[in-house]
């Protein structure tokens, strides 16, 4: 599924032809440059490797410096590989080509992958949506606790997977089946319906669905 690397600008709302309000997330998709192509003969799979956000040479590690120079490419901060969909040829893509927001069209469905906001160590009410305890009729000392988490003498332990307090957020999340409402090719902006993971200016990967 071919896609682009970009960043989340934020959320806004637009109106359709009938005057209905549509909440959208604005994503700056690209521009991205194709660094190289992966082939079955050399790598065992087919894909295109794209780079996003150019950086000076002094900020590139030695292994990546050799990789960029090998393919005669500029230096990029972010690199991702996109594999084609089943039966989709890669003959139309060549090293050095630039991919922009016009890769997507109005009405298409896309998927967006990003890292969610980190909430730190949170309790069960925020992390799992527990209701908590009532504020009266005998409740005291604990109002936002998880309640009983184990058993008595048998099996005398806490089962794995028990929903408890802990690290919340800061995880890779993919939101699927988002409709593309509008594409601004001049500014490389893609507006998708609904929310996507991550904070403002966070890195996102947007790609076409089957």
Image: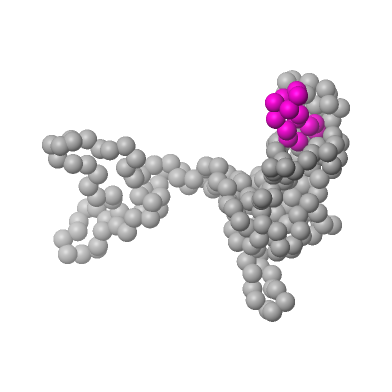
Q: Residue at x 73, y 57 (%)?
A: 190
Q: Nearer the viewer, residue 188 or 44?
A: 44
**Residue 183 x, y percent position in the rendering:** 77, 60
Residue 104 lies in what quarter of the image?
A: bottom right
Question: In the rendered view, how is the structure colored?
Answer: one colour
From this view, report whether residue 148 is shown above or below residue 154: below
Q: Residue furthest bottom?
A: 18
Q: Is residue 59 visible?
A: no
Q: Quadrant of the N terminus?
A: top right
Residue 50 lies in what quarter of the image?
A: top right
Q: Nearer the viewer, residue 139 or 75?
A: 75
From this view, report whether residue 97 is shown above or below residue 71: below
Along the horizontal axis of the image, is 165 left or right of 179?
A: left
Whether 51 is among the magenta residues is no
Q: Nearer the viewer, residue 115 or 86?
A: 86
Whether 37 is among the magenta residues is yes
Q: Residue furthest front?
A: 87
Q: Residue at x 76, y 24 (%)?
A: 41
Along the horizontal axis of the image, is 8 left or right of 168?
A: right
From this view, report whether residue 106 is shown above or below residue 115: below
Q: Is residue 128 visible?
A: yes
Q: Residue at x 18, y 41 (%)?
A: 151
**Residue 76 x, y percent position in the rendering:** 77, 34
From this view, report whether residue 73 is shown above or below residue 99: above
Q: How many marks are shown on the rendered structure? A: 0
Report the span colored magenta: 35-48
């Amino acid at each position: 599924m071919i896609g682009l690397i970009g960043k989340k600008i934020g959320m806004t709302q637009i109106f359709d032809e009938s005057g209905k309000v549509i909440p959208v997330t604005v994503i700056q998709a690209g521009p991205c440059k194709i660094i190289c192509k992966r082939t079955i003969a050399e790598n065992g799979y087919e894909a295109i490797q794209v780079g996003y956000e150019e950086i000076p040479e002094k900020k590139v590690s030695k292994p990546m410096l050799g990789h960029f120079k090998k393919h005669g490419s500029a230096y990029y901060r972010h690199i991702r590989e996109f594999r084609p969909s089943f039966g989709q040829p890669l003959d139309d893509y060549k090293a050095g080509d630039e991919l922009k927001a016009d890769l997507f069209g109005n009405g298409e469905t896309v998927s967006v992958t990003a890292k969610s906001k980190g909430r730190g160590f949170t309790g069960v009410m925020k992390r799992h949506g527990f209701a908590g305890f009532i504020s009266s009729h005998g409740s005291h000392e604990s109002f936002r606790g998880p309640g009983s988490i184990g058993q008595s003498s048998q099996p005398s332990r806490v089962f794995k997977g028990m929903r408890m307090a802990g690290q919340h957020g800061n995880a890779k999340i993919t939101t699927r089946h988002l409709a593309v409402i509008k594409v601004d090719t001049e500014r490389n902006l893609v507006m998708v319906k609904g929310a996507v993971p991550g904070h403002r200016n966070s890195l996102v990967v947007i790609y076409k669905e089957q």
